[in-house]
Image (cartoon, rainbow, N blue to C red):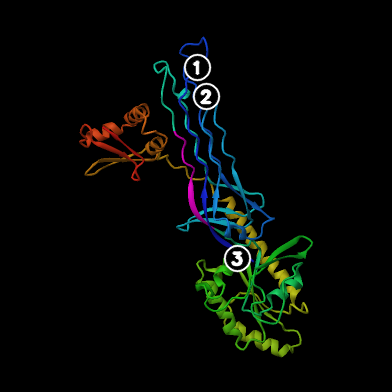
Amino acid sequence: MFVDKSSVVLKAGDGGNGIVSFRHEKFIDKGGPDGGDGGKGGDIVLHASRNQNTLASFRYQRLLKAPSGKPGGMRNKRGRSGQDLIVDVPVGTTVLDMEGKLLADLTEDGQKVVIAKGGIGGFGNAHFTSSIRQAPRVAEKGEEGQELQATLELKMIADVGLVGLPNAGKSTFLASVSNARPEIANYPFTTLTPNLGVVDVDKGTTLLFADIPGLIEGASQGKGLGVEFLRHVERTLALVHLIDVYHDDIAEAYQTIQNELKAYQVDLTERPQIVALNKIEGLDDEIVADKLKELKKVVPKGTPLFAISGASKQGMPELLYALKDVVTKERTKVAEVEENQGLPVIQLDADLSWHITKTEDGFIVSGAKIERFARKTDFESPDALRRLRDIMQKMGIMNGLYRQGIEAEQTITIGKRPLGTIKY
């Protein structure tokens, strides 16, 4: 079964905890701290592979979880890091968060993207030694790995997309010009999954065609499987719109598909198009000319118009050479856009910022950096709490609380989603 959309939960590995430990060796008095750091949690890495062609495996594996790092050990032994979880996905897979924001787009074979980062391991007490702190009893907890719910979508990558109503002859066309062998039969919706075919136009030009299963009126709103199939048209550089010459109303057939392409979430009518009357084998030239004249009334001026036969290959060479010119121009445009994107805008790091909110019970302190320290703090340890207060003092948070009128023994909550509390 062809599956091109799936929801998954991605959970990177947590970092291992650092430990509090002191050397205990015969004849060595006060050997000092030797607690090791925790290991890093494993990342989740998506790997685009041409050996994958569907997202079917994610129908039954909705949770992707990477191993966590191990805690540190005595004698400054660092915990083992969690192994990265490498997940193979088909080339053409996009990753969206629950708000529809694009997180990754894997368009090349072998491309890798870290989609969820593992947590950093916590420091052991050996890390905190200094000239004035000879025996620290502080160790950090490991950071939690990133967790997110995402949607994987597969969009076929092809130069040309074949669109049209059911029974327009798309599969016959693809089989005629390429190495593809799609199922062909004389009934609607023969093709239930998109098919790819490689077409050698001449010695120097090869085009990749995608046969998009028949669209119907209302496809852009989800009728039939239209939305699922229109997704694959997004990546094509050009479209070939095939129309059955035997259709009762050729103009209506053309307009139906155009309306669905325009109503989709991306206006697909902006793609360069070639319109072709198909199945003309056996028809008189006069009848074909009349049909083309009827079609010209609704086709935008400048759109190439052909009369062809996928079965007998009549008119096919001319169409393919015209298509070659269109795709070559589009490839050049894409290359120029990629080249002129320029340097990325570097924005200031906002990790150091923090915010204080006064509540009935006390104060809430929020901010990326202070919350990160709070996640690594053991709130049951007096030494760890003392270190957290020192960090808040150095960041200016304590002075900020004083200016807002905090009183002794009032509660300070770290994070809007409470990570822990301390007393002023």
Instruction: Find out whether residue 149 is within the magenta segment.
Output: yes
Residue type for callout 3: His
Residue 67 versus residue 188: which sits nearer the camera? Answer: 67
For image coordinates 57% across by 68% down, the residue present is 228
Could you classify mark 1 by the number of other residues whose Cα lies within 10 Å: few (under 14), some (14-19), or many (20 or more)? some
Mark 1 or mark 2, which has the lower sequence index? 1
Q: Which residues are magenta?
A: 141-151
Secondary structure, mark 3, is helix
**Residue on which disc 1 sits:** 24
Residue drawn at the location 58% of the way across and 64% of the way down: 234
Image disc number at residue 74: 2
Give the quadrant of the C terminus: top left
Q: Which mark is residue 232?
A: 3
* Residue 140 lies in the magenta stretch: no
Question: In the rendering, at what x and y percent does residue 63 appear?
Answer: 54, 52
Instruction: Decide if residue 422 is on the left or right side of residue 255.
Output: left
**In the rendered structure, which disc, 2 or 3, sits on the residue that comes first in sequence?**
2
